[in-house]
């Protein structure tokens, strides 16, 4: 050592540094070598590391764990003796809709004349992080006035490089890392005193020590920036407040991950006990299950600072990273991600954090863009990365990414000559618009203006309705007549399933089937069913003047001994072996009627037989068969309804068929004379007019 005595005399005093003594850090960190106040000798000390998470749980600089649910703005850390003018505040608010528990909403950092607020706008879900400087939003990354602030996608990292101060703030968790060399034995507030002694961490603003840090925390109000209506307890605590018990609660299984093989590699560097205790507390006190993730996240961050990287999020279902589509999650990475603009001579944050990073093989174009690129080049005015010497179009200009300047230069493009157009289709008018293929150039096009379309008064035929539509590529309505779902017959519309009076000989119905030619519904007609089965003696005859024919009588029908017989008009039938009984078919008006008659033979008298024929003195030598007719015929009188008179019908027995025969007569003088006579072959009843017969002499031809 050197000492100034007088008259510019300097005395050199030998100083022997004490031997190094190993120490154990109460906060579980690894001891570091620091110089003494004379910057001469080194000794081991413990850097200051304070953490808070959940609702919230604190681990002080010296590793003391406690929970505190205050609802105000508090001093997290301030210097006892102002050396670097650094103050850190925490803004806690109630954050659970059911339980009265609080969460850190923001971290406020005052450094000299600068004031920054690291804030999370969403305490119950994915973080919405933002940084304000004097209540104005900062664009990240930020690097001014000896301060750096970056966003990893999950956490905000605040650094004062020359003091090696690092403050992180995430969803509802924070960490404060201070070097012992600058801040050892000179801190107070919720994070306690950084002197590797937990006994004095629960110190009130006046320097008094209390047994409970939970009670102590009530008194560290940030008076200048505190929330309204925050009140300091009027009486100093005398007894430690009892911690809330959660023995009756079964913690979520996610808390057990802290003690499993997932985090086992870190256990020998950082104890998981306090983080497990906080996780169980949150699991039993808060309704939002994602709060339990913060205990695991905070422990993983502490492990990362000790050099142990834990891939833990893929072992849970509710602790997602929520990285954007163009980034990938990494549990450990540099707080300042590599960019195309990195200067190897410029110092970078020496801090490891989890976050959303560019995929392997890519880097950020620059710190501000957040765009990942495979190759470095330029960013165009829209923030799209361009490779060196890449030519592209932007804002009606032709641009190029110049490698020499790493900037984009643009020049206007020439427009093609205009083409004169006419618009022949109705409704289109010629207008000037931007060419889609050359956005910087105008062009003339035909544009539809429907108010210029002609008026149409179209009338549709029966069974059709007017329809109007604009075909593709057209402007004006084109009117057409669309067929209705009806049938049309003789200028009358008929609905489906209704009867159509089309033909008297047919039953016609309007169907649901569409006629492909007309588009209207088809009319289906079926012919009337005519009764063509006629009674015996009748025959079905078509009638051109009627829909159906008629059964016309063609025969007389009668029954004889149980057998049906048919006779044509004018025909006579006699039973076999009985020629004396006759059945004759006759027409009476328009009806055929069977008339029966029986020939009654008179008693046979020999005297009536004339076996020989005589003519004067001549006679036949042999007997001659001379038949004759005799008997009764049907004669009647009845009243006719049709004629309204008495109807008479008379018939007489006479020959029906005869023939002339010749016989030789022998005379007395020996002469033979031929004689012709009428031979009766068939007798019958012949109808005749009824009248009163006049008396006349009977003429008898004698047959011998």
Image (cartoon, rainbow, N blue to C red):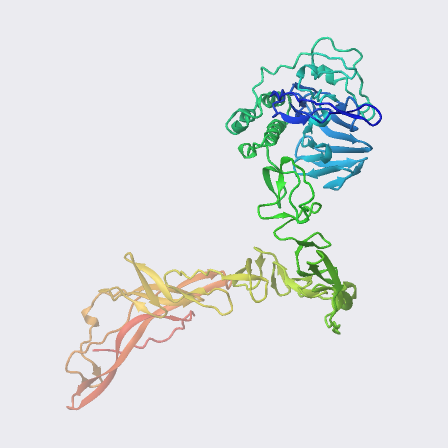
Q: 66 or 343: which is nearer to us?
A: 343
Looking at the image, which residue sits at the far top? 238
Residue 532 pos. (x, y %): 42, 62
Residue 552 pos. (x, y %): 42, 65
Residue 614's place in the image compared with 602, above or below, is below
Q: 135 or 16: which is nearer to us?
A: 16
Looking at the image, which residue sits at the far right? 7
Residue 542 shows in this picture: yes
- Which quadrant of the rendered structure holds the C terminus? bottom left
Residue 447's place in the image compared with 238, above or below, is below
Residue 446 pos. (x, y %): 74, 68
> On the picture, is 498 further left or further right than 405?
left
Q: 40 or 190: which is nearer to us?
A: 40
Residue 49 shows in this picture: no
Residue 672 pos. (x, y %): 17, 89
Q: How many marks?
A: 0
- The quarter of the picture where residue 508 lies is bottom right
Residue 116's place in the image compared with 80, above or below, is below
- The quarter of the picture where residue 174 lies is top right
Q: 589 or 290: which is nearer to us?
A: 290
Q: Which residue is rendered at x = 77% and y = 11% of the image?
A: 236
> On the picture, is 180 further left or further right than 253?
right
- Which quadrant of the rendered structure holds the N terminus? top right
> On the picture, is 141 further left or further right than 631?
right
């Amino acid at each position: 050592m050197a000492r100034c005595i007088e008259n510019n005399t300097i005395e050199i005093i030998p100083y022997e540094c004490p031997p190094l003594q190993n120490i154990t850090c109460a906060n579980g960190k690894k001891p570091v070598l620091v110089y003494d106040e004379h910057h001469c000798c080194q000794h081991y000390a413990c850097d200051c590391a304070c953490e808070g998470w959940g609702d919230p749980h604190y681990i002080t600089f010296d590793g003391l764990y406690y929970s505190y649910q205050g609802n105000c703005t508090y001093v997290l850390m301030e210097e006892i003796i102002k050396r670097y003018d650094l103050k850190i505040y925490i803004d806690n608010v109630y954050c659970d809709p059911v339980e009265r528990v609080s969460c850190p909403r923001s971290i406020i950092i005052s450094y000299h004349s600068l004031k920054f607020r690291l804030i999370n706008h969403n305490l119950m879900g994915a973080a919405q992080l933002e940084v304000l400087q004097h209540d104005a939003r900062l664009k990240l990354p930020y690097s001014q006035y000896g301060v750096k602030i970056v966003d990893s996608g999950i956490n905000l990292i605040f650094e004062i490089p020359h003091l090696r101060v690092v403050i992180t703030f995430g969803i509802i968790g924070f960490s404060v890392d201070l070097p012992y060399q600058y801040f050892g034995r000179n801190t107070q507030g919720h994070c306690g005193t950084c002197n590797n002694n937990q006994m004095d961490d629960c110190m009130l603003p006046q320097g008094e020590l209390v047994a409970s840090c939970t009670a102590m925390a009530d008194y560290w109000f940030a008076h200048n920036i505190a929330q309204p209506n925050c009140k300091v307890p009027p009486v100093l605590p005398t007894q430690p407040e009892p911690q809330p018990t959660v023995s009756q609660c079964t913690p979520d299984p996610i808390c057990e991950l802290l003690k499993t093989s997932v985090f086992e590699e870190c256990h020998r560097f950082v104890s998981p006990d306090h983080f497990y205790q906080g996780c169980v507390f949150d699991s039993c006190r808060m309704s939002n299950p994602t709060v339990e993730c913060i205990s695991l996240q905070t422990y993983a961050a502490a492990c990362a600072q000790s050099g142990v990287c834990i891939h833990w999020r893929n072992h849970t279902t509710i602790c997602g990273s929520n990285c954007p589509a163009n980034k990938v999650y990494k549990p450990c990475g540099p707080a300042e991600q590599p960019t195309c603009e990195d200067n190897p001579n410029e110092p970078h944050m020496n801090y490891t954090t989890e976050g959303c990073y560019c995929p392997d093989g890519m880097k950020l174009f620059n710190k501000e863009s957040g765009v990942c690129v495979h190759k470095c080049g330029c960013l165009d005015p829209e923030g799209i990365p361009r490779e060196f010497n890449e030519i592209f179009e932007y804002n009606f200009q032709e641009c190029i990414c110049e490698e020499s300047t790493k900037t984009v230069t643009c020049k206007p493009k020439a427009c093609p000559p205009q083409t004169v157009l006419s618009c022949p289709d109705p409704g289109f008018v010629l207008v000037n618009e931007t060419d889609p293929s050359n956005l910087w150039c105008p062009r003339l096009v035909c544009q539809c203006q429907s108010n210029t379309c002609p008026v149409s008064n179209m009338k549709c035929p029966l069974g059709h309705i007017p329809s109007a539509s604009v075909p593709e590529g057209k402007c004006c309505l084109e009117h057409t007549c669309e067929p209705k779902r009806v049938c049309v017959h003789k200028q009358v519309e008929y609905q489906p399933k209704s009867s159509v009076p089309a033909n008297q000989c047919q039953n016609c119905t309007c169907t649901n089937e569409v006629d492909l030619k007309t588009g209207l519904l088809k009319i289906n007609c079926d012919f009337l069913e005519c009764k063509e089965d006629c009674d015996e003696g009748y025959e079905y005859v078509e009638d051109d003047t009627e829909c159906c024919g008629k059964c016309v009588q063609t025969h007389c029908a009668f029954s004889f001994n149980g057998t049906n017989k048919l006779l044509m008009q004018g025909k006579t039938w006699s039973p076999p072996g009985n020629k004396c009984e006759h059945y004759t078919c006759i027409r009476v008006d328009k009806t055929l009627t069977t008339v029966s008659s029986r020939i009654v033979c008179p008693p046979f008298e020999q005297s009536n037989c004339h076996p020989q024929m005589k003519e004067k003195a001549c006679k036949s030598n042999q007997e001659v068969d001379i038949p004759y007719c005799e008997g009764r015929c049907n004669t009647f009188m009845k009243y006719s309804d049709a004629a309204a008179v008495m109807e008479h019908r008379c018939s007489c027995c006479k020959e029906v068929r005869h023939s002339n025969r010749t016989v030789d007569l022998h005379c007395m003088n020996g002469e033979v004379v031929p004689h012709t006579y009428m031979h009766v072959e068939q007798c019958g009843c012949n109808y005749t007019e009824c009248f009163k017969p006049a008396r006349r002499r009977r003429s008898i031809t004698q047959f011998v």
